Image: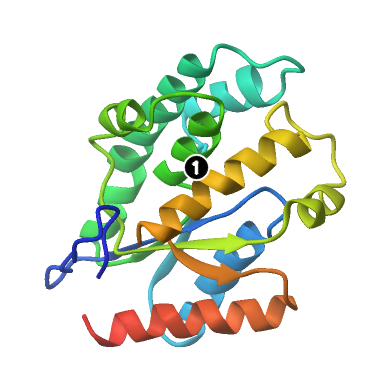
């Protein structure tokens, strides 16, 4: 299994599996993450959906203090809060689920911080350092959809991070991570069922080899 650094990660016997699904808002990542959980359950796998920002106290702070604002807070503060939420999320929810042998499908993970706050000018190595306690996922996918398409798809009020210009920069960082083999590219500009089938086949293939 390929890690963020391009190295293989071995799933230890008896442990669960962490699958991360990334993408711009409007890319369909939440639909696909939940759909993957459902498809895995139908095949008899014990799969669980989770998301970042998390449902914990820090995650709720992020939703109310950062995402609901009309003006961005300092970018370093964004990154630090997301990193703090990630530690809380991993320790409180993800690790216990993995220890129970469950397949955890995470809607956004460390790659989102690298993409969104990195696109805003933060050093990617620094972002990596403050996220050093994040677990290495067994599989990380990027659902890629052109920026013009996602902007049209977002019908709700857009967050401060979702201007077209920002999203174009974010997509560039995501694609760089694809080139570095930290993320596996999925063409999301297709019918939902076609994208879901592609993701399920990749996940199932991984599960069969571990």
Find residue 157 and report its horizontal and vertical position in percent: 84, 34
Whether residue 196 sits left or right of residue 46 in the image: it is: right
Identify residue for label 1: 112
Whether residue 201 sits left or right of residue 38 in the image: it is: left
Nearest the viewer among 181 and 188 is 181
Q: Is residue 172 above or below residue 76?
A: below
Q: Secondary structure at mark 1?
A: helix
Give the mark count: 1
- Residue at x 68% of width, y 48% of height: 25
- Residue at x 60% of width, y 71% of height: 35
Find residue 154 and report its horizontal and vertical position in percent: 82, 47
Q: Is residue 93 above or below residue 105?
A: above
Q: Is residue 162 above or below residue 194?
A: above
Judge whether residue 105 can be spotted in this image.
no
Judge whether residue 149 can be spotted in this image.
yes
Q: Is residue 198 above or below residue 14?
A: below
Whether residue 98 sits left or right of residue 111 in the image: it is: left
Find residue 128 and report its horizontal and vertical position in percent: 31, 34
Place residue 133 in its image quadrant.
Answer: top left
Whether residue 31 sits left or right of residue 81 in the image: it is: right
- Residue at x 60% of width, y 48% of height: 171
- Residue at x 60% of width, y 12% of height: 73
Quadrant including the N terminus = bottom left
Crowd around label 1: few <14 · some 14–19 · many ≥20 (10 Å):
many
């Amino acid at each position: 299994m390929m890690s963020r650094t391009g190295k293989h990660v071995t799933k230890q016997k008896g442990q669960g599996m962490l699958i991360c699904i990334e993408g711009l808002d409007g890319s369909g990542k939440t639909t696909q993450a939940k759909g993957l959980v459902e498809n895995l359950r139908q095949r008899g796998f014990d799969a669980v959906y989770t998301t970042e920002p998390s449902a914990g106290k820090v995650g709720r702070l992020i939703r109310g203090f950062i995402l609901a604002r009309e003006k961005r807070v300092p970018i370093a503060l964004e990154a630090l809060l997301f990193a703090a939420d990630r530690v809380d999320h991993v320790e409180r929810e993800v690790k216990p689920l993995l220890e129970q042998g469950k397949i955890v499908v995470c809607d956004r993970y460390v790659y989102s911080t690298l993409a969104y706050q990195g696109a805003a000018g933060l050093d990617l190595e620094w972002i990596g350092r403050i996220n050093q306690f994040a677990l290495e996922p067994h599989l990380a996918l990027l659902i890629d959809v052109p920026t013009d398409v996602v902007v049209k798809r977002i019908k709700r009020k857009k967050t401060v991070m979702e201007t077209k210009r920002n999203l174009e920069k974010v997509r560039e960082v995501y694609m760089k991570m694809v080139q570095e083999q930290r993320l596996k590219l999925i063409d999301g500009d297709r019918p939902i069922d076609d994208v879901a089938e592609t993701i399920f086949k990749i996940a199932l293939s991984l599960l069969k080899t571990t």
